[in-house]
Image (cartoon, rainbow, N blue to C red):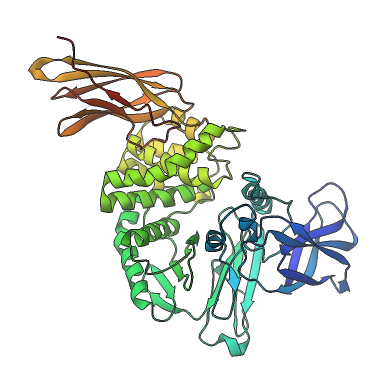
């Protein structure tokens, strides 16, 4: 790797030293300022921002102190081998096979796939050490760096020797650079943001092209590539109904040869092909459809809507009960996190959090609950009117949904998006049935919220052959009344069908007793 790095001194005092870090598998060779080669001290630095669990840090002595707000350009050269390595995961107890399934980045003759910061630090960065054993420290550290560097430009040229270039494709998730690249090279431009992890791929891959998606696959896997493209196209109308048409061309790259966990960054997705289960393919396709249809610099919107699209796909194909089971897998980890409590409710809110559990799982529930409260038409219209270029205020999405639904959602966004007030805990205090005219029953149900967040929740009266339900809003520390008409005497009352995450789901049922004669 050869290139230039331009640094600006954002402190108020002159700086004599500059610090740069790359993966510990790479060695610093040369650093110059202008025509002058400068001294630097290279040493290992333990941190889990890289898959090796360490970086190689170069401390550079500048020719003269850099004044405040002034910039300096360093010409750097480093080289090395990026091999499969999951040391950072195994040392915190992850089984080796599972660790390698997650950290699969490597450069090899047959296939190269390398993700950036958070996986392989293949471009220079500078940040404090962070450990996976220290809660959310790694993700918070990387998020702080991205916020500080937001808007910075990165230009990358990836080159192959002429004798190795034949038949190989070079892919990346940056935009094609306007700058000309020499033979055997492809050039890409990046702008540092919270969502994009600069990633590149090199391999002997075949392309299966469709109008909205290209599937890159190894030789002999054309049928599996066609199957993925077919499912992508089958689900496209569902995604378009919610998010509008795709804004980017989707690129799918097959991870072949060994087990590997899927990974997506923007329009680029990596995953094995031909896993045998259409449901697995559908989850990948629906996620990717959301990513190319609506983008946001806010993780709770960007990732949350992608998981929401998966939920919609499961519901569309398998029904509501299967969709609720999909939600269930995210509800349990949220309940566990809720029991630990929030150290800082504002910092852990969806608009600020760096915790993947929150901006993926909790935001999924937020979108699902909003749908139940305002309806499909209003929510889809709000999403389609969203423009990241217009998103200058945390309440922007709230106002879009309110304008379409004509509902006041301040209480909901305050408890679920702007602050982390924990989860609700619904408890049925009492249920009284009363027979009314026509032989029907009116059941009065008192529901108490023992948790910290308000929510609109469904209450069900189970009767022979079916159920009746109503929805009520229950604020934290308060009680609310639900009244349900049934044709028969109910056998059981249930609050919450799993569509609202709770800290405790064991107290949601109430067995009915026949009314006294």
The reply to whether residue 73 is visible in this rendering is yes
* Residue at 31%, 55% in the rendered image: 238
The residue lying furthest to the bottom in this view is: 163
The residue lying furthest to the top in this view is: 517
Where residue 12 sits: x, y (%)?
Answer: 84, 46
State left or right for residue 313 relative to residue 451: left
* Residue at 50%, 61% in the rendered image: 263
The reply to whether residue 419 is visible in this rendering is no
State left or right for residue 487 relative to residue 372: left
Where residue 303 sits: x, y (%)?
Answer: 48, 50
In the foreground, 387 or 98: 98
* Residue at 30%, 58% in the rendered image: 237
Task: Look at the image and tell me in which quarter the C terminus lies.
Answer: top left
In the foreground, 270 or 182: 270
Query: Quick check: 316 above or below 83?
Result: above
Query: Quick check: 413 above or below 287?
Result: above
Task: Look at the image and tell me in which quarter the N terminus lies.
Answer: bottom right
How many numbered callouts?
Answer: 0
Where residue 297 sits: x, y (%)?
Answer: 54, 50
State left or right for residue 387 relative to residue 377: right
Tell me which corner region of the image, top left, top right, bottom left or bottom right, holds residue 240: bottom left
In the foreground, 25 or 207: 25
């Amino acid at each position: 790797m050869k290139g230039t790095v331009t640094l600006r001194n954002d402190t108020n005092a002159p700086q004599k030293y500059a610090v740069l870090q790359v993966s510990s598998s790479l060695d610093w060779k040369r650093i110059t300022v202008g025509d002058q080669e400068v001294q630097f001290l290279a040493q290992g630095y333990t941190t889990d921002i890289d898959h090796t669990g360490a970086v190689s840090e170069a401390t550079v002595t500048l020719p003269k102190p850099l004044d405040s707000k002034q910039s300096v350009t360093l010409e750097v050269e480093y080289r090395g081998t990026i091999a499969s390595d999951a040391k950072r995961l195994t040392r915190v107890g992850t089984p080796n096979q599972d660790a390698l399934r997650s950290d699969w980045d490597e450069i090899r003759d047959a296939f190269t796939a390398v993700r950036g910061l958070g996986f392989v630090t293949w471009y220079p960065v500078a940040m404090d050490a962070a450990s996976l054993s220290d809660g959310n420290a790694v993700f918070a550290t990387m998020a702080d760096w991205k916020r500080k560097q937001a808007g910075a430009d990165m230009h990358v040229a990836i080159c192959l020797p002429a004798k190795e270039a034949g038949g190989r494709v070079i892919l990346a998730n940056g935009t094609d650079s306007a700058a000309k690249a020499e033979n055997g090279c492809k050039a890409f431009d990046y702008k540092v943001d919270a969502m994009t992890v600069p990633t590149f791929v090199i391999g002997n891959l075949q392309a299966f092209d469709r109008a909205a998606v290209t599937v890159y696959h190894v030789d002999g896997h054309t049928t599996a590539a066609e199957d993925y493209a077919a499912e992508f196209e089958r689900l496209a109308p569902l995604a378009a109904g919610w998010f509008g048409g795709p804004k980017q061309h989707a690129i799918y790259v097959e991870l072949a040869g060994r087990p590997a966990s899927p990974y997506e960054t923007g329009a680029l997705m990596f995953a094995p092909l031909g896993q045998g289960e259409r449901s697995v393919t559908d989850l990948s396709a629906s996620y990717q459809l959301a990513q190319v249809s609506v983008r946001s610099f806010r993780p709770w919107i960007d990732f949350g809507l992608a998981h929401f699209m998966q939920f919609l796909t499961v519901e569309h194909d398998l029904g509501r009960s299967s969709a609720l089971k999909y939600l269930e897998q995210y509800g349990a980890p949220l309940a566990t996190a809720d029991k630990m409590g929030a150290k800082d409710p504002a910092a852990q809110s969806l608009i600020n959090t760096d915790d993947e559990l929150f901006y993926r799982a909790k935001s999924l529930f937020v979108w699902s609950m909003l749908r139940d409260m305002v309806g499909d038409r209003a929510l889809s219209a709000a999403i389609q009117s969203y423009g990241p270029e217009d998103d200058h205020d945390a309440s922007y999405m709230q106002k879009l949904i309110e304008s379409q639904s004509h509902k006041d959602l301040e209480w909901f966004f305050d408890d679920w998006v702007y602050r982390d007030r924990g989860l609700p805990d619904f408890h049925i205090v009492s249920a009284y049935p009363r027979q009314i005219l026509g032989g029907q029953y009116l059941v009065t149900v008192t529901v108490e919220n023992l948790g910290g967040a308000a929510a609109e929740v469904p209450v069900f009266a189970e009767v022979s052959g079916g159920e009746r339900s109503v929805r009520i809003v229950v604020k934290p520390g308060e009680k609310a009344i639900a009244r349900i008409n049934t044709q028969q005497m109910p056998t059981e009352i249930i609050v919450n069908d799993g569509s609202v995450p709770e800290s405790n789901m064991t107290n949601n049922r109430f067995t009915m007793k026949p009314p006294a004669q």
